[in-house]
Image (cartoon, rainbow, N blue to C red):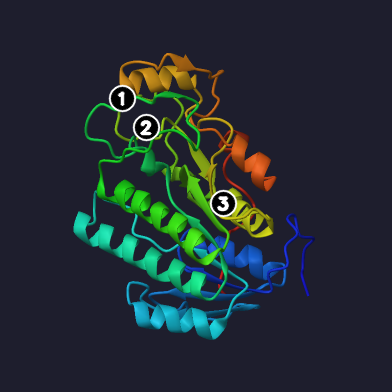
Amino acid sequence: MSSRTPEFEHDVETTIVTGATGDVGSWVVDRLADRGTRVVGLDLERPAGVRANAEFRAVDLTDQGPTWETIDEVDPDAVVHLAALSDPLSTPGTQLFENNVMSTYNVLVAAGRADTDVVWTSSQATYGALFADREWTPDSLPIDEDHERRPGDPYGLSKRCSEETARAVARRYGIAVTTIRPATIFSPDRTPARPSEDDTDLSEDATAGNFGSYVDVRDMARVVEAALASDHDGHEAVLAVADENYLGQPTAEIVETVCGDLPADCDLEGRESAFSNAKAADLLGWRPAHSWHDGGATEDPGPTWL
């Protein structure tokens, strides 16, 4: 029995969530389990304790056999793939690239063979700005799903390659695959990690690359559920991003400071995000509900394992 009224109606009774104990995965598990969906969480380790409507299995997703066996055995109505290594600055590029590409291939192909739809997370890093080590200027603003993707770092490249896997799996097996490209993800219980709006040096690495774009982790859990409720065919990619930048300054000025110039095609007003969330609204009926400018912190303590 669901303990809340569903915001997005879907008929998914059982779903696998990979990266289930991670910063995003734990929120997704909670949101789905709270509405009565049976969740089977996969991660390298199982969490302590128990959680209603959720069970957890320790699986290395880079190992094809156990990954395929688990998805075949659970026989879910949907697979939500969130597992990945995400920091090319602290993880060797070879390790990060191999982990992300192989795990995504194994999970998505197994889902395709099981005729199971997929929602998974790519990244804004596929465009190339986030971890760029040389000048990067957008072709147009705001950046949307059709903007050229030209990553130069192993993380962005791993996600770019994985997006091609998603397209191939959707074509070969005829399943629906939703690729979510989130901006930098903030959690309400980690307010100190958010850069200050006051006297921010826009040339600092901390603000470069994402142009102050972000999405609240609660909105990430919402967009996953919205994707599960959608009825599109084939492969679709959507950006998940808040309406405004978190720096509290005009976005065009941020981009110009970081990149040294603005593209000729620039249609931004005030603090409007450098990335567009219009497709997510049109395709999934999702709009961001949480803003750091409303205070960031929340009385909601976040996911807990009882």
Q: CA distance from mark 2 to mark 1?
A: 7 Å
The answer to whether 260 is drawn above or below residue 44 in the figure is above
Contact check, label 2 and label 1, Cβ < 8 Å: yes
Gap in Å between the C-alphas at discs 3 and 1? 28 Å
For label 3, the residue is 220
Classify 10 Å Cα crowding around label 3: few (below 14), some (14-19), many (20 and above). Answer: many
Q: Nearer the viewer, residue 279 or 184?
A: 279
Amino acid at pointer 1: Ser
Q: Which mark is residue 203?
A: 1
Residue 149: x and y in percent read: 37, 38
5 or 180: nearer the viewer: 180
Identify the residue at horizontal 41%, vertical 30% (top origin). 211
| Mark 1 residue crowding within 10 angstroms, few (<14) / some (14–19) / many (20+) | some
Q: The residue tagged with tag 1: helix, strand or loop?
A: loop
Task: Give the labeled residue for mark 2.
Answer: 207
Q: Secondary structure at mark 3?
A: helix
Q: In the image, residue 213 lies at what x, y percent?
A: 47, 35
What kind of residue is marked 2? Thr
The answer to whether residue 82 of the structure is visible from this angle is yes
Mark in the foreground, 3 or 2 = 3
264 w.r.t. 286: above or below: above
Quadrant of image for the N terminus: bottom right
Who is closer to the viewer here, 206 or 199?
A: 206
Please give the label number shown on residue 105.
none
Q: Nearer the viewer, mark 3 or mark 1?
A: 3
Label pair 3/1, CB-CB below 8 angstroms: no
Q: Residue at x 24, y 48 (%)?
A: 89
